[in-house]
Amino acid sequence: NWEGMFSLALDPEKARAYRASSPPTDAQVCTMCGKFCSVKHMSAAKDIDFWQ
């Protein structure tokens, strides 16, 4: 919830500008870790049946 995060920021306008300056390239991840997103990788890994 980005609007919630912006409302909690010390400087909401600066936070919005920073977010706008580096939009995510993939809708499934944020700009923090990009393709190295552990949440995305674990979501994919939990769908794999390792015991086949």
Image (spheres, helix red, strand yellow):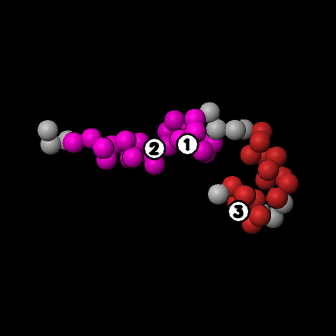
The secondary element bearing badge 3 is classed as: helix
Q: Which label lies toward us, 1 or 3?
A: 3
The answer to whether marks 2 and 3 mark residues whose Cβ atoms lie closer than 8 Å is: no
- Side of 15 where 33 appears, left or right: left
User: Which residue: 46% across, 49% down?
Assistant: 39
Dot 2 or dot 1: first in sequence order is: 1
Residue 37 counted in the magenta span: yes
Taking depth in this image into account, of 48 and 34 the one nearest to the observer is 48
**Quarter placement of the N terminus:** bottom right
Q: Mark 3 = which residue?
A: 4
Q: Position of residue 5 (x, y in %)?
A: 70, 60
Q: Mark 1 = which residue?
A: 29
Name the outermost residue toward the top. Answer: 25
Q: CA–CA distance between discs 1 and 3?
A: 18 Å
Residue 28 counted in the magenta span: yes
Against 6, is 50 above or below? above
Identified by mark 3, the residue type is Gly
Q: CA–CA distance between discs 2 and 1?
A: 7 Å
The secondary element bearing badge 2 is classed as: helix
How many neighbours does mark 2 have within 10 angstroms: few (below 14), some (14-19), or many (20 or more)? few
How many neighbours does mark 3 have within 10 angstroms: few (below 14), some (14-19), or many (20 or more)? few
**Quarter placement of the C terminus:** top left
User: Which residue: 70% across, 62% down?
Assistant: 4
Q: Position of residue 25 (x, y in %)?
A: 62, 33
The answer to whether marks 2 and 1 mark residues whose Cβ atoms lie closer than 8 Å is: yes
User: Which residue: 51% across, 35% down?
Assistant: 35
Identified by mark 1, the residue type is Val
User: Which residue: 63% across, 42% down?
Assistant: 31
Identified by mark 2, the residue type is Lys
Q: Mark 2 = which residue?
A: 40
Q: Position of residue 40 (x, y in %)?
A: 45, 44
